[in-house]
Image: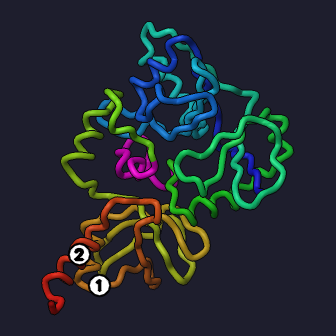
């Protein structure tokens, strides 16, 4: 199976007798139900509920955890975790001598090392933690893994959503197990809970299908009105950030969506349960006008 060294990821270890309790009260995922070998998807948020960094999160043992985090976010994440720590008995260190590899696809040899399931979606595969010198022997070409995640409609922080300016719902974290809505308080919890129970996110990341080449950053229009923008692209498909209300208006009015001269179809990823507003509107019209 493909094993790709993800050179844009790094590891942070949290350890100490109060690590579980502290982290459970700070990040979006449930830490206290984890057993050694378990994995979660989560984030640290601002008090206003926006994503500072998302990460995959692994339990090494009862008192030791790993953050698999975008390398560009590692220093800021470390700084903010230390800021929240106060007197909690937990230590943080960046694991400079270790690396992360994505393991996915058909069966084949996998190097030795702890292998954690990707908690977002089983089809994504797993994440292997291994020494940096062992990772150097692997392919570090991200193209195959990027095509894999885009084909599954899985967003990636940076390309698909901006850190510091995106709510978890807008990044589909609520759909991918990145937020535990049953746990107690964490930083930004009140805003996220309110969005979950009282409102519908205006923006969502959805799949985009098209029959001719398009590029990242191209806007999607309904007539002369912008509906969204392509954020990740592979062969014939991509991920787009979309204003659902505008896409709904276009769909119900029969206006084609286009990026340049290319028609684009937007659809909800197979793993998502949120409603595309036009699905509700079309079904309501069907019920109203369909002969009984």
- Location of residue 152 with respect to 8 vertically, above or below: below
Q: Position of residue 270 (x, y in %)?
A: 46, 65
Is the Cβ of the residue at disc 1 closer than 8 Å to that at disc 2? yes
Please give the range of residues in magenta.
158-176
Residue 242 falls inside the magenta stretch: no
- Cα separation, mark 1 vs mark 2, equals 8 Å
Asked which quadrant contains residue 275, the reply is bottom left
The structure residue drawn at horizontal position 44% and vertical position 43%, both measured from the top left corner, is 178
Q: Quadrant of the N terminus?
A: bottom right
Q: Residues within 10 Å of mark 1 (few under 14, many from 20)?
A: some
Q: Which element carries disc 2, helix, strand or loop?
A: helix
- In the foreground, 286 or 269: 286
The residue singled out by tag 1 in the image is: 255
Q: Residues within 10 Å of mark 2 (few under 14, many from 20)?
A: some
Q: Position of residue 42 (x, y in %)?
A: 47, 38
Q: Which mark is residue 34?
A: none
- In the foreground, 270 or 100: 270
The structure residue drawn at horizontal position 37% and vertical position 79%, both measured from the top left corner, is 257
In the picture, measured across the screen, residue 75 lies left or right of residue 172, that is right
Asked which quadrant contains residue 58, the reply is top right
Residue 168 falls inside the magenta stretch: yes
């Amino acid at each position: 199976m493909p094993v790709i060294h993800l050179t844009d990821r790094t590891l942070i270890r949290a350890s100490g007798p109060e690590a579980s309790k502290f982290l459970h009260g700070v990040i979006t995922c449930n830490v206290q139900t984890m057993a050694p070998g378990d994995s979660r998807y989560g984030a640290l948020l601002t008090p206003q509920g926006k994503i500072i960094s998302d990460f995959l999160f692994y339990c090494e043992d009862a008192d030791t955890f790993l953050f698999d985090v975008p390398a560009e976010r590692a220093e800021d994440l470390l700084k903010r975790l230390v800021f929240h720590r106060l007197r909690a008995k937990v230590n943080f260190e960046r694991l400079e001598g270790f690396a992360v590899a994505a393991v996915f696809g058909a069966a084949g040899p996998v190097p030795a090392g702890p292998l954690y399931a990707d908690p977002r979606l089983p089809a994504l595969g797993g994440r292997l933690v291994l020494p940096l010198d062992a990772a150097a022997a692997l392919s570090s070409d991200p193209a195959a893994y990027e095509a894999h995640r885009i084909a599954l409609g899985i967003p990636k922080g940076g390309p698909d959503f901006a850190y510091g300016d995106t709510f978890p719902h807008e990044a589909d974290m609520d759909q991918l197990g990145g937020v535990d809505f049953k746990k107690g308080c964490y930083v930004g919890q009140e805003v996220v809970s309110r969005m979950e129970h009282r409102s519908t996110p205006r923006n969502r990341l959805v799949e985009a299908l098209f029959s001719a080449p398009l590029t990242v950053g191209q806007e999607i229009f309904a007539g002369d009105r912008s509906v969204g923008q392509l954020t990740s692209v592979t062969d014939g498909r991509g991920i787009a950030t979309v204003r659902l209300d505008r896409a709904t208006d276009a769909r119900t009015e029969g206006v084609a969506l286009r990026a340049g001269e290319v028609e684009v179809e937007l659809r909800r990823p197979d793993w998502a349960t949120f409603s595309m507003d036009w699905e509700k509107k079309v079904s309501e019209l069907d019920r109203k006008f369909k002969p009984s």
